[in-house]
Amino acid sequence: MGIYIYNLAHKYAWKSMKEVEIQATCDIIAKRAEKAYKDIVAKNYYTTIGDLLSNDDIDVVDICAPTHEHARLSIAALKAGKHVICEKPLARNLESATEMLKAAEKSGKGLYIGHTRRFDQRWRKTKESIDSGKIGTLLYIRRCERTWLPFPPDYWHWDPEKSGGVLLDSGIHCANLINWFFGSKPKEVFARGNMIREEAKANGVHDLVTVMIRYEDGKTAFIDVSWAFPMTYAPFYSSRDIFGTEGRIEYSDRCESNGIYSRQSGFWWVW
Ligand SMILES: NC(=O)c1ccc[n+]([C@@H]2O[C@H](COP(=O)([O-])OP(=O)(O)OC[C@H]3O[C@@H](n4cnc5c(N)ncnc54)[C@H](O)[C@@H]3O)[C@@H](O)[C@H]2O)c1
């Protein structure tokens, strides 16, 4: 279910799993559901979640619908006895997220959220380097994810009620990575949102947000996320700067000297 991220990533992942039988596709726009059904070679296509869930041959539902629909669709699928894979963010707000988790617990079915960064080799390597003590005690992480949001002003991303703005949409990736690297949860958060582009001002949604996070023992993180970053290339720009007592790890999408620097050996390993 979905169009952009479905066509960019999910479709290929499902196609590559030969042991999986694709039963059906679903989109509220019939021609999208039909196109996806033909393309992935499914047995049926639907335009409502109700019809999809009444198909007893379906074990797992993969939700790529807009963020504000995650909770409703996931809860319905879990109640119907299906396992759920749902795109990030978990839900639009804490209340819906809690309901989703309760529904998963009650159903005994799996609820997996698509925090894809954790499966990216670059961030897995970073996590391994941190955990192996290569840079000593971790002190500070800076992470940015920026893009020029290409969608028209009436698209759901620009509606704060639907997407939660750039902080929820992109910031969730940063927060998820940083919590994972630190292996703990934030103690204190300070954030400042801005509306830069005309689409953001017209819709009252933040398109540039900076966030400071304090973790235990004085560990600190800084996030900046933006939909107003001038760029013509797709899909987006990200960078990460991590330092510990004994070294640092740097990575940027546009830099050729990404790597790990050790303070003790003075050596720079380029990835
Ligand atoms: N993991 C990542 O890196 C990543 C990247 C991009 C998007 N996403 C997430 O994926 C989700 C979808 O984003 P997108 O950019 O692909 O959106 P999109 O607007 O391109 O596609 C959403 C599709 O869902 C359909 N839809 C809407 N409501 C529906 C419903 N109730 N039932 C069935 N279909 C419905 C729409 O018609 C549309 O075809 C978002 O939650 C977004 O945060 C994740």
Image: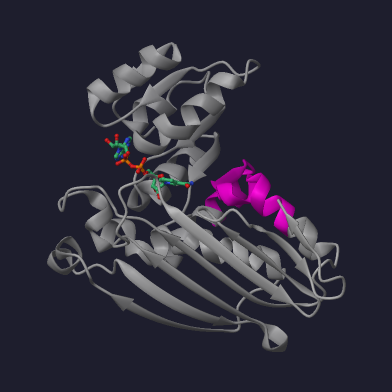
Q: Nearer the viewer, residue 255 or 12?
A: 255
Residue 107 in magenta stretch: yes
Residue placed farthest to the bottom in the image? Answer: 218
- In the rendered image, the vertical position of residue 142 relative to residue 10, given as above or below: below
- Indicate yes or no whether the magenta region holds residue 118: yes
Q: Nearer the viewer, residue 100 or 220?
A: 220
Quadrant location, ligand no. 1:
top left
Query: What color scheme is it?
Result: one colour
User: Is 201 on the left-hand or right-hand side of 88?
Assistant: left
Q: Tell me: residue 42, above or below residue 164.
A: above
Instruction: Specify whether 147 is left or right of 113.
Output: left
Looking at the figure, which quarter contains the N terminus? top left
Q: Where's residue 235, x and y in %?
A: 39, 45
Task: Answer left or right for 98 relative to 263.
Answer: left
Q: Is residue 152 left or right of residue 64?
A: left
> Relative to the observer, which residue lies in front, 64 or 200?
200
Image quarter of residue 135: bottom right
Residue at 58%, 64% in the rendered image: 240
Q: Residue at x 63, y 68 (%)?
A: 179
Which residue occupies 86% across, 75% down?
Answer: 264
Q: Residue 265 at x, y = what percent?
A: 87, 70
Question: Disc count in the image?
Answer: 0
Looking at the picture, tell me which residue is in the foreground, 138 or 110.
138
Q: Main secondary structure of the magenta part?
A: helix
Residue name at image x 38 percent, y 16 percent: 37
User: Range of the magenta residues?
Assistant: 102-126
